Each structure stands twice: as structure tokens, then as C-alpha cells.
Image: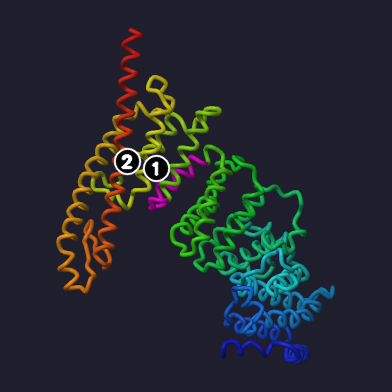
Amino acid sequence: MHRGRACRPVAGNYSRRKEQVIQKLPNKVYSVGLALSTLWSQLSLLPVPYSKEQIQTDDYGLCQCCKALTEFMRPFVEEATDNKENKENEKLKDELLKFCCKCLKCPLLTAQFLEQSEEVGKDPFWSFASEIIGFLSEIGHPVPQIILNHGRKKRTWGCLELEEEEDRQLADSVASLTYLVFVQGIGIDQLPMVLSPLHLLQLNMEHIEVLLQRTEQSVFSKGLELLENSLLRLEDNSLLHRYLEIKSFLAVPQGLVKVMTLCPIETLRKKGLALLQLYIDKLDSQGKHTLFRCLLNTSNHSGVEGFVIQNIKNQIDASFKKTSNKWFVGPQLISLLDLVLFLPEGAETDLLQNSDRIMASLNLLRYLVIKDNENDNQTGLWTELGKIENNFLKPLHIGLNMSKAHYEAEIKNSQRNSQAAASTCKGVCSVTVGGEEIPAMPPEMQLKVLHSALFTFDLIESVLARVEELIEIKTKSTSEENIGIK
């Protein structure tokens, strides 16, 4: 609670008295800057409330302090904008600008906002953000100027100190501002109505990348919301492939992969997955092809690779059912299949760890064999069949035999030694699989884990057998047709 008390003196009459004292000091601009910097330093120490209940109780006084700060700033904002063009006013504007940017970063970057369906007047952070954005406009930095000019060579701020920081600390502040404008709707009416959805997405992607790079759930979740808000404005297949040449347009889907695979909160993982699918849907065919290659090369996660392979299958299917799409037939498709239909480490690939990818690959291959006749060879599959057998099917057979033999031996060993393990380890034992020790657990649980692995291998083996059976049927049928023609 000591930290909570640190900032409480800014509230109420104290802040007004402090303002009156500063007004009488000889070097007023310096004093205002020093006071604002000190107040922000104290403000940044306070824990940010995350739930509606925490915001309402305001145990550490952060919400109260935010309200008091805006009251403290207003007379200085009015003085700086009294239409008197002088050096002191410009310096005062610079100090106010720096403070507003700091507030956008803390506490507004990590603050949780109440649902928009609730009365915004009851949300202290929404009110604080609205005041800060209003101050920015009053001192000559309206929302359109900041958002539309950010990242350009043209000077955005007119404040040398901020210009020097633009690529570092200010990135968080502008990303926070962009979220407040587009998701919370604060100041969005200031933006020109003529801006296209595609242009707005391009403006926002850099800020979405910044937000997704952060590890705090309250920050990267804002990146997810901003991305969703931007993508929903676009028509499907309207995002041209050339946009992927911009760094953020590839960095954002890779950031989504990190959310999908590393975030401990299931709802956010699912939202990351849904947004990656939405992003794929918005890309044109060449863009989809490029993104698939990128994710297959960089994700290093079997589940994500399985998801990408399923999307490749969907695009091939659409190409068969609608107009033929050159990016998902022939040579362009083969370049993707080369990344899909192979085992990274040959027969020694960890089949259990890569089971999602392998199952998706087999299902894709089965689909291609059924859908594409050898004589038509629209996909180019039959030309590459020999390479696929050598790089994928044969190593997979060998790997399955090795893995099943290993796990069957571990099951027998676990059963044989369960009584000894129970007596020496008090019912807890360990088993080594693939050179790594399974965490200590009761023998019954370990047997379930080992049997589950065997079930996965059996499932892969059954699909593999069906694929090879279909290949044999198709090639035999084609040979008979060719003989009949002769």
C-alpha cells in the first residue's frame, strides 16, 4: 500500500496549490516540465487495475490520480494555446507533449478498458485517454497528424527530443494512441473519411507489430483487437501480395504464431488462430502462397504447420472447383509440396512431436491422389511422385517401425518394473523415451502416455497405408487405360 500512497498527494486541492506555486516561479516552463516528469514517475509506480472490480475499488488510487493529473494540466494547456506566439509557449507545448506521450505509454498502454457497451463515462481510463488526446489536439498535435505522418521522413512532432526518440520509446506511445483511436473510437471522427480500408491497415500494421512483440497480456491483446478491427474492413482476397514486402506484414502473422503457441490463456490462443485465418483470407492468391512458405519455414511448430497445410489443401480444392489458380497447381504448388511432403530429419524425425504436421501432410497427399488423375496431372503431383516416395513415404515407414518398436519395448519394460518402481520410488517412476526422460509420474499414468503414443503411430500408419493403396490403384488404372488406347 505504500506504493499506492506515493501518488495520492496529486489529487484534489494539493494539485491546485502546486499549480498556483508553479505559476509564480521565475522559470515556469522548466518547473512545469519537472513537476510533470516527477508526477509521471510516481504514477508509473502504481499497479494498473485490470478487472472491472479493481477499477471500481481503485485500491492504489491510480484512477483518482489520472483524473487529478488532467485537472492539473488543463490551466497549462490553456496558457500554451492562448494564441500568443512566443518562445515560452512553444517550450511549454513541448513539455506538455512529452508528458502526453508518456501517459499514452503508461498507464494507457497496459490499462484495460471496460466493454464499450457499458457507459464510457464510468471508465476512468477511457476518460483519461480522451483528455490526453484532447490535449494533444489543443497543443497542435491532432490525431490525423500523428497517425498519418508517423514513420515518414517528414518531421511529425516539432520537438527535437521526441524526434530523436521516435524509433524507440515513442513506438509504444503511438501504438497505444492508434489502439485508442481505432478500437476505442477516441478521436476517430478527426480522421479523413476518404481513407481506404487498405490504407488504414497499412498505417496500423507497424503498431500492431509493436503491440504483439510485447509479452504482457494486456498489451499484446490490444494488438489482436487492433488487427481484427483493421482486417474486418477489408474484402476477402483484396490484400495484394506486394504488401508482404513490407516488414510488418510478415512480422504480424509471425507474432500471431507466438500468441497461438506460447500464450498461457486459451481464449487468446484461439483468437490468435482465428486472426491468422482471417489474415490469410484477406490475401490474394500469390500472397497466400508467399505467407504459407514463410510460415512453413519459420514456425517450428507441428500444430501451426498442420494448420498451414490444411489451408494449402483448401486453396487447391478451391482451384479445382472454381477457376484454376496458377499459385496452387503445377510448379508453384510443387514448390509448396517440397516443404510439406518430407521429414525434416528423415527416418529419425520425432514422429510424435511432428504428428500434427505428418497427419496433415498425409491427408493432403491422399486428397491430391484422389482428386488429380495421372493423365491430367493438373497439380504436378504425378511427376514428383518418385521424389515424394523417397523423401516422405519410405522414411515415414522406417520411422514408424523404429518408433513403434521403441515404445512397445518401453511399455514392456514399464510393466515389468512397475512393482520395483513402486517400492523404491513410492509409486512414482520415470521412463526414457527418445533419449528424454518423461517427468516422474505413477506407472499407470506412464502406461497411458505410452499407449497413447502407440495409438498415434497406428493412426499415421493406417492413413499412410491408404495413401499407398490409392497411389497403386491410380497408377494401375492409368496403365490399363494407356494399354487400351494403344
Position of residue 465 in the picture relative to residue 67 (left or right): left
Q: Amino acid at mark 1?
A: Ala
Secondary structure of the residue carrying tag 2 is loop
Question: Could you say which quadrant of the image residue 127 lies in?
Answer: bottom right
Q: Amino acid at mark 2?
A: Phe
168 is within the stretch colored magenta: no
Question: Could you say which quadrant of the image residue 484 lies in?
Answer: top left
Give neighbour class at mark 2: few <14, some 14-19, many 20+ (Cα, 10 Å): many
293 is within the stretch colored magenta: yes
Secondary structure of the residue carrying tag 1 is helix
- Please report the residue visible at 30 percent of the width from the left and 53 percent of the height from the top: 452
Give neighbour class at mark 1: few <14, some 14-19, many 20+ (Cα, 10 Å): many
- Please report the residue visible at 69 percent of the width from the left and 82 percent of the height from the top: 64
Position of residue 472 in the picture relative to residue 113 (left or right): left
- Please report the residue visible at 32 percent of the width from the left and 34 percent of the height from the top: 466
Per the image, the residue denoted by label 1 is: 360
Q: Nearer the viewer, mark 2 or mark 1?
A: 1
Residue 365, how many percent across, how many down? 37, 35
Residue range in magenta is 288-303
Residue closest to the eye, 449 or 77 = 449
Comes first in the chain, label 2 or label 1: 2
- Please report the residue visible at 51 percent of the width from the left and 62 percent of the height from the top: 213
59 over 430 or under it: above or below: below
Per the image, the residue denoted by label 2 is: 342
Residue 120, how many percent across, how many down? 73, 69
Residue 377, how many percent across, how many down? 40, 24
Residue 318, how many percent across, how many down? 52, 33
Residue closest to the eye, 254 or 259 = 259
